[in-house]
Image: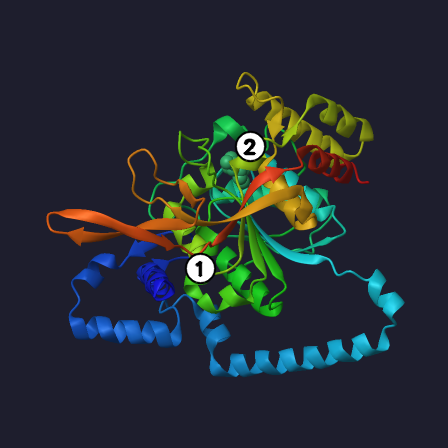
Amino acid sequence: MLAQKENRERNRTVFRLKLFDYRRDGSFASRQHAWKNLGFKERGRIWRNLTRDGFLDPECSRSDAINSKGAQMKRFLKTVALLALAALSAATISPAQGQSQTAAKKIIIDTDPGTDDALAILLALNSPDIDVAGVTIVAGNVTSELGLENALKVMSLANRCDIPVAKGAAHPLFQKLNTEVFWNGKNGLGGAELPPSHCAASSQFGPDLIIGVVHRYPHEITLVPIGPLTNVALAISKDPSIVPLVKEVVLMGGSITGGNVNAASEFNIHSDPEAASIVFNAGWPITMVGLDVTERTLITNADVVRLEKVGEPEASFAAAVARFQIGTYQGTGFGGGAVHDALAVGAVVDRSFLKTQDMRVDIETDGRFTRGETVGNRGNAIDRVVPRGDRLETVGVDAVQPNVQVAVGVDASRFIELLVSRLSGK
Ligand code: BDR
Ligand code: CA
């Protein structure tokens, strides 16, 4: 019953979003008004089209192609061929060989670089246990233009122009973009300079890249969103069929113990609460690496000195970024710089860095003081309240289904050691 209700609510949210023309340049025109004025029949027709054909937007030709019958058949045949191949190679690899070949985890990083984003990207690129299948850029810490430029510079620094980097949403779904020069410096990288990139940007729109990569590697991709969730929300709204094909979502965002932009809300969720609501209600496995753990995961001056001593461009860049991070936290009571986004990547490398608790998490999209708060239901229960004459009466307690594994504990020193040693090229 509850599941049905949640499903209906999810469909409604996705449907609302589908009434938008979201354009490649990031602008969008709302058709919600028109929807309100439509007659019953017309609404029914649009609804049937939406549920049958997917996104109606004429610019969404890629998703149409992905959803077409021919493409579905091709994907099916490809999957059968791949399965046959996998079975064949499993049969020919001896157990000893098999044991030594642990496949690297495929991830897509959705990012707004951003100082700690840059450290997160470098950690992923320097982790043999991770295979970065794509990087998508969302507006957040900086504009999507600057985010793209920064990401391309970082990829170039790491000599990884082979990985597609695609610009995505230029602003949140329903509110103004709020960039953060104060926390990331004017260039978004804490003033750390990098040479111009020799990598080129992908011509795809970020959400389309996510859709394409997930279909290419069904059940293999871990999504690692470390910025506002606009791109991910757009991707699943355009092509909901990717939801069950994603292995898991490990995101940096939220908090169940207070915010960093205000008393209640964390920056990434506060930057696009409606997008966050879509992502948290999608029905896929989510791990929330929020401020509850990232603000306990601090890089220190001693770590920076270690990075500086390496004398290699990547480590020196990471040192400069980390030094800026530490500076921004000075006087706030923190004993170092919180490397928020890097911890989300760390959790993909080694899950045992985190202690998690399953919780029902809802996103506050109203709230005068709490918009963007991730409201964690620690007991996964809500009172059952019924009308009783002129009042309401609590008659029991209903269980709610957890939708998120919330990180509530972290082995911070072990993670920082991994981060510093991998950024040192070890
Ligand atoms: C998050 O917001 C941004 O400032 C950081 O890059 C991180 O993703 C922390 O609240
Ligand atoms: Ca970020």
Residue 117 x/y as whole percent: 59, 40
Foreground: 45 or 21? 45
Tell me if mark 1 has few (under 14), some (14-19) or many (20+) residues whose alpha carbon lies within 10 angstroms of its own.
many
Tell me if mark 2 has few (under 14), some (14-19) or many (20+) residues whose alpha carbon lies within 10 angstroms of its own.
some
Residue 124 x/y as whole percent: 68, 47
Q: Secondary structure at mark 1?
A: loop
Q: Amino acid at mark 1?
A: Ala
Quarter location, residue 106: bottom right
Name the quadrant of the C terminus.
Answer: top right
x 59%, y 64%: residue: 213
x 86%, y 69%: residue: 95
Residue furthest to the top:
331
* Dot label at residue 282: 1
Classify residue 241 as left or right of residue 134: left
Foreground: 374 or 270? 374
Classify residue 137 as left or right of residue 367: right
Nearest-to-viewer mark from 1 and 2: 1
Foreground: 95 or 51? 95
Q: Amino acid at mark 2?
A: Asn
Residue 293 x/y as whole percent: 57, 36
* Dot label at residue 187: 2
